Image (tube, grey):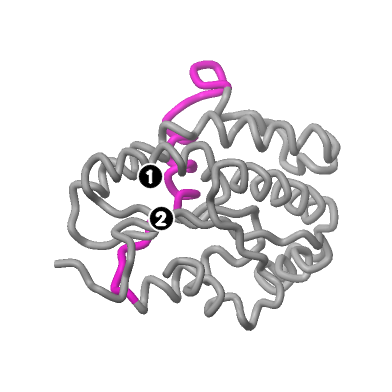
Amino acid sequence: MRADHRPWDILLIGGASGVGKSHAAARLATTHSAFTVEFDDVVAALQSATTPATHPALHHFAGHPAPEENLGTDRVLELQIATAHALDEAVLGVVRNRLSVDVPAIVEGDYLTPRAAARAAAEATAHRRRLHAVFLHESDPARIGANYIRREPDHGPQPARAEVSARYSHWLAAQARAHRLPVIDCHPYDTLPQRLTAALT
């Protein structure tokens, strides 16, 4: 039975690394008694089950433990986008599986592309299910870097990684707007849950 206060059966939350997707997903999951899929886990499983030889598009960063320092910002961003596009079918596979389950689900991750989200929404509509997608955006690498320090204190400052993440966030936001999907600025963080809820209703 559908809950009147929840306008979705499946919710996709995309955004770059370090912008607060997991925190937002956890709060919404608690509010709506929803199952959460961390797409990063799916990505890790796919990479473990494949090799650079068999699936090169999933292993662009193989052999580069610190890609931002070894490859440079432009190249890392290019490979990040290529990897995300290579995972579009995996996103759709997760969504198709959740379409057969009545429990509401939230799928969140760095590699959710607006292109895949738009396709997933169309498939959900065809199955008479409600799928919404939203992309969180943080434009300031300093704020992303601060989030990394809070989340991963043992790694110390990661300015190069934060710069890539901010640039990837800009790309995701532009793509989301092109697909007419909502984009929510993460800052200020203390009002993000309320603004996210408003955007979804």
Picture layout, residue 123 above or below residue 149: above
Q: Which residues are magenta?
A: 32-56
Q: Nearer the viewer, residue 198 or 59?
A: 198
Q: Position of residue 108 (x, y in %)?
A: 47, 56
Residue tagged by mark 2?
Answer: 132
> CA–CA distance between discs 1 and 2?
7 Å
Residue type highlighted by circle 2: His
Q: Position of residue 167 (x, y in %)?
A: 77, 48
Check if residue 46 falls in the magenta segment.
yes
Image quarter of the N terminus: bottom left
Q: Quadrant of residue 65?
A: top right
Helix or strand or loop: what does disc 1 sit on? helix
Check if residue 129 falls in the magenta segment.
no
Q: Residue drawn at (38%, 41%), measured in percent from left and top?
A: 120
Residue 121, label in figure:
1
Q: Residue drawn at (84%, 51%), measured in percent from left and top?
A: 160
Picture layout, residue 84 above or below residue 200: above
Q: Position of residue 17 (x, y in %)?
A: 65, 55
Q: Is 178 situated left or right of 66 in this image?
A: left
Image quarter of the C terminus: bottom left
Q: Residue drawn at (53%, 77%), measured in percent from left and top?
A: 193
